[in-house]
Amino acid sequence: MFGHIFVYRLKVLLRDKSMIFWTMIFPIALATFFNLAFGGFSSQGTFGTIPVAVVLESDNIAFADTLEKMSTGESPMFKPDFVTPSQADALLSDGKVAGTITVADTMALKVNQSGISQSILKIFLDRYAHTTRTVSRIAAIHPESLQNMDLTPVTFTKDAPITTGNLDMTLNYFYALIAMACFYGSFFGLEEVSLIQANLSRRGARLNMAPVHKLKAFIYSSLASYTILIGEMMVLMAYLIFVLGVNFGSQIGLILVTVFIGSLAGLTFGSFIAALVKGDANMKTGLLIGITMIGSFLSGMMFAEMKYLVQTKFPLLTIINPVNLLADAFYALYFFSTYNRYLLNISGLLIFTVIFALSTYWVIRRRKYASL
Amino acid sequence: MQVFKLCLKIFKKNLPVMSIYFGVFIMVSIIMMSNNRPTEQAGFIQAKTRMVVFSEESSPLIDGMKEVLSDIAVFEAIEDDENQLQDALYFRRISYILRIPENFTEDFLAGKNPTLSVTSVPEATSKIYIDMRLDQYLNTANIYVNQIPGIDAQTLNTYTLEDLDYETPVQMLEADQTFGEEGMMPYYFNYLAYTFMFVVIMGISTIMLVFNDLNIKRRNACAPMSSTSVTLQFYLATMLFSLLSWALLAGLSLLFSRNELSDSNTLAFILNSFVFALSSSSIAFLIGNLVKGREAISAIANVFTLGSCFISGVFVPQAILTDSVLKMASFLPTYWYVRGNTLIAISADFSKALMIQLAFAVAFFILAIVVGKKKRMAIEA
């Protein structure tokens, strides 16, 4: 019995091109677009050498020395270009350099916009002036100590990284996308319920006549759906990891567990809506897409910052949004060495799944129809 | 005008689906409006970045440090909790977490070179920015500690702050230029590309699907009506639909950016979006001629519009996209539409972008006609 229903259901589902498109091809296409669009996004805000024009009005060996030190080495801070004042203005207005330093007795800076590169240039020049002031003050009050004065900078800071992960904001888009794909699995759940309920489809009516235990038939055929959904999710994950190179951390086992639980949550969510909501299939599909999209939106699939906004301003919304729980589980796995947050998300997701499954069971069991 | 009337009837039937997409456009525009208000500024303004300081002691040295940092940073109040700090760093709410350990001041004054612990987004420009300022403060103080043995904390504070008080004069290349963003109008018009393309592909291909059904096509062919008239009425109806959608979306874009209506660029934005409407309509004709089933339409419409909008800079600015992606995108009219909007925003010459879109419109339209003709000649659908 199991074999019969399972195998035929698999065959039917695999031929449903539209279903396969929305639950597998569409997320893959979306992931590809994310990858294309965010290719240059992750390097945003990362420091790059600042090009700067330098105009020498007078020779200043000490300054030239400092600038030289900042412009060499493995990751130089500046890329100086020694030019005449008119060349400097041309470079500046073309946006080829971030600013122009005029070297005289006091340094001056010329820029054509306010930005962090320009601010760094200013701070650099400030530093030079500050040190000059310090030295002359010491020369005034303690001239004798000038001889053994040591200006070698001392490092007073020590990096204490918060995570071993790369704080790349684009990851969140992919995490939310997987969560969306899992919840698109709800189309399968919707279909399964429609096909088992006599008032929703002809196949349901026929099945209710057959001497088969309805719950068993439902579970067998849902298992076929679940198998396909898991297969699709594996394809999606393989695509993300091996083709696009999205980083999920090293805990492959737990990531797979998360996908399994997420797909189950998605599937039961679909059956839950199908069983509980009155209305035709179009309306139910619309509802599923709508809820999944709003959930994905709030987990940052369109704007990553949205997730943070929700977390800090409306924390309740993160708990009652299963899409976010799923996306956050991936996030927690990647960024934290402890499992508290991950387990919290997973238990939330499991509670949702149990509620969805039990409510579905409660609605579809023992339905009797006077006429069909 | 039977054909024309029929087309309008089909549009009417699809109105609910279309209105969802118009609704999405309005929603996203409102979100953008509250999200990215550009700030106008004149002259040079020192950049400020957001950071958190956790100090286990307080002393004049640390007060001075905070004062110096406050020139370039805004201190945020975030609870000292790993979860919250990680999220704040990840979503760039803050870029720097500074922890001052107990006895820092004492060790510092004793010349023991104690260290502060820094957590930041690695390699970030904002990290280097704060590092430089912090470094300068502590090194200046350190010089005094080394050179003036037994200096008291108060004097050290005064000396250091006085030295760091100097600011380099900064001149702007064009003194009276204001440096705001170009306003929000280009964003609304860019986003119009997504909604318009989707609605037009859905709308036009839905009608074409009805007309291309083999049985209906054969029945129509028997009608005592010249095929020229049928075709003309058909294009008239679809153009009307495109025009209405365009007018509605352009009107909404203008409504959202009503504060900028007086800008001289407004007309150019409208013109650019109109030309884009032409080119997307011809793409829609082509897709309508190629697609076979109702289910396939929404699949293609979704993938094509999302894809072209992502790589052409509608959702993510073109400046951020990599060169290879942009090269790929330059084969799409959407790319040239966004490019046109960018050029209009800075009052540059956008005629090239406009001409390329027109060329796309003509090319796709001819292609659509050729494909359509071939299909009509075919015996089976």
Image (spheres, rainbow, N blue to C red):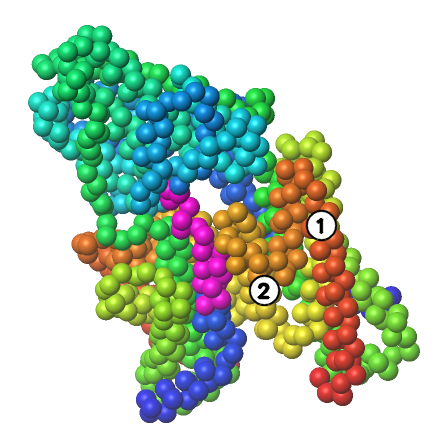
Q: Is residue B113 left or right of residue A101?
A: left
Q: Amino acid at mark 1?
A: Lys
User: Which sits earlier in the primary sequence, circle 1 or circle 2?
Assistant: 2
Q: Is residue A267 visible?
A: no
Q: Is residue A36 magenta?
A: yes
Residue at the disc numbered 2: B304
Q: Chain of mark 1?
A: B
Locate residue B183, reporting x and y percent: 59, 35
CB-based contact (under 8 Å), mark 1 and mark 2: no
Q: Which residues are magenta?
A: A28-48
Q: Is residue B9 left or right of residue B41?
A: right
In this rendered view, identify the residue nearer to me: B212 or B166: B166
Q: Chain of mark 2?
A: B
Q: Amino acid at mark 2?
A: Phe
In this rendered view, identify the residue nearer to me: A48 or A289: A48
| Local secondary structure at mark 1 | helix
